[in-house]
């Protein structure tokens, strides 16, 4: 029997995350849940901040990388880390463009390609 990698989400959970248009995230136990757009690349989960505000989720996760994800009425313990690498950034942007295709979404999909928003890209893993 093979054991699942504890640093990766199960295939079932990945499918649920991939199907969701939004998921709730919270850093630590004090920060509020914020709903974000999410993409899945193979077996990895990414989110990108639109506004890098001092009180926003991206800064909260920089201060406290442990948190919680709310998906399908379940809360899952997570760890967040900043994503890096040009190939990865392009793949994330392509995933956003493929997933979020409504006319209203296109503004945000294009905006996610800016340098300041690329710097606010986070990979979510279970903890």
Image (cartoon, rainbow, N blue to C red):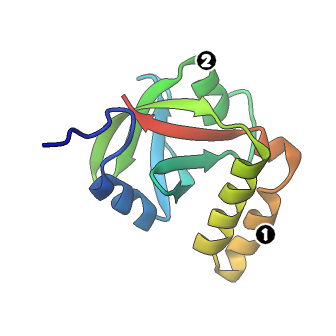
Which part of the image, by quadrant, shows the N terminus? top left
Task: List x then y, in percent, for residue 36.
Answer: 56, 51
Residue 2: quarter of image? top left
User: Taking 119 as reference, is 47 above or below it?
Assistant: below
Taking depth in this image into account, of 42 and 40 the one nearest to the observer is 42
Taking depth in this image into account, of 97 and 21 the one nearest to the observer is 97
Task: Tell me the SS state at disc 2.
Answer: helix
How busy is the neighbourhood of tag 2: few (under 14 within 10 Å), some, or many (20 plus)?
A: few
Taking depth in this image into account, of 25 and 46 the one nearest to the observer is 46
Taking the image as shown, residue 117 lies to the left or right of residue 65, namely: right
Taking the image as shown, residue 103 lies to the left or right of residue 16, namely: right
Task: List x then y, in percent, for residue 68.
Answer: 40, 34
Instruction: Tell me the residue that label 1 is attached to.
Output: 107
Instruction: Tell me the residue that label 2 is attached to.
Output: 63
Residue 56 in view in this figure: no
Residue pictured at 68% horizontal, 70% vertical: 97
Q: Residue furthest left?
A: 1
Task: Tell me the SS state at disc 1.
Answer: helix
User: Taking 127 as reference, is 47 above or below it?
Assistant: below
Residue pictured at 56% horizontal, 40% vertical: 123
First along the sequence among labels 2 and 1: 2
């Amino acid at each position: 029997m093979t054991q699942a990698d504890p640093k990766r989400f199960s295939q079932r959970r990945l499918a649920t995350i991939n199907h969701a248009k939004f998921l709730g995230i919270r850093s630590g136990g004090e920060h509020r849940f914020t709903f974000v757009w999410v993409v899945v690349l193979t077996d990895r989960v990414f989110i990108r901040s639109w506004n890098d505000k001092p009180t926003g989720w991206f800064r909260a996760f920089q201060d406290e990388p442990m948190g919680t994800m709310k998906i399908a009425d379940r809360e899952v313990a997570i760890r967040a880390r900043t994503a890096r690498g040009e190939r990865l950034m392009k793949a994330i942007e392509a995933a956003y463009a493929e997933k979020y295709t409504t006319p209203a979404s296109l503004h945000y999909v294009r905006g996610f390609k800016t340098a300041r928003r690329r710097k606010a890209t986070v990979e979510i893993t279970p903890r």
